[in-house]
Image (cartoon, grey):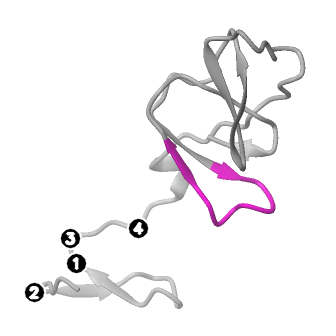
């Protein structure tokens, strides 16, 4: 682990000390989080864009929700298996992007 010259209290008990030049910010200030949507009305087996669920790509759509890049996180079940996507995609309603 990289060592720094100075550290400060993070103000968060379970984190402890952090490098003195770091800032503590709410996650909403660092990233935008979107919620996927139901795919039933956009499903098209000849579609151009992948429909991505918590288990990966499982269909195609003619529209996309996000142009990428993005990280897709499952809301339940596969929350420990994030996916990095660098292209336009449709995300289902059980995932955040």
In primary-sequence order, the first of circles 2 and 4 is: 2
* Direction from residue 44 to residue 83 in the image, left or right: left
- Disc 2, disc 4: CB below 8 Å? no
Mark 2–mark 3 contact, CB under 8 Å?
Answer: no
In the rendered structure, which disc, 2 or 1, sits on the residue that comes first in sequence?
A: 2
Q: Based on the picture, tell me whether residue 9 belongs to the magenta stretch.
A: no
Q: Secondary structure at mark 4?
A: loop
Task: Name the residue beneath numbered marker 4.
Answer: 24
Measuring 55% from the left and 49% from the top, which residue is drawn there? 83
Residues 17 and 78: in front is: 78
Q: Is residue 92 left or right of residue 28?
A: right
Q: Which residue is mark 2?
A: 5
Mark 4: few/some/many CA within 10 Å (<14, 14-19, 20+) = few
Look at the picture and state if 6 lies above or below 38.
Answer: below
Q: Are marks 1 and 3 in contact (CB under 8 Å)?
A: yes
| Residue under label 3 | 21
Q: Which span of residues is magenta-colored?
A: 73-84
């Amino acid at each position: 682990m990289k060592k720094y010259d100075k550290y400060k209290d993070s103000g968060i008990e379970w984190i402890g000390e952090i490098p003195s030049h770091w800032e503590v910010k709410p996650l909403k200030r660092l990233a935008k989080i979107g919620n996927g949507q139901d795919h039933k009305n956009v499903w098209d087996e000849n579609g151009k864009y992948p429909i991505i669920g918590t288990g990966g790509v499982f269909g195609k759509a003619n529209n996309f929700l996000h142009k990428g890049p993005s990280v897709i996180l499952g809301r339940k079940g596969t929350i420990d298996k994030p996916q990095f996507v660098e292209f336009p995609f449709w995300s289902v309603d059980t995932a955040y992007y």
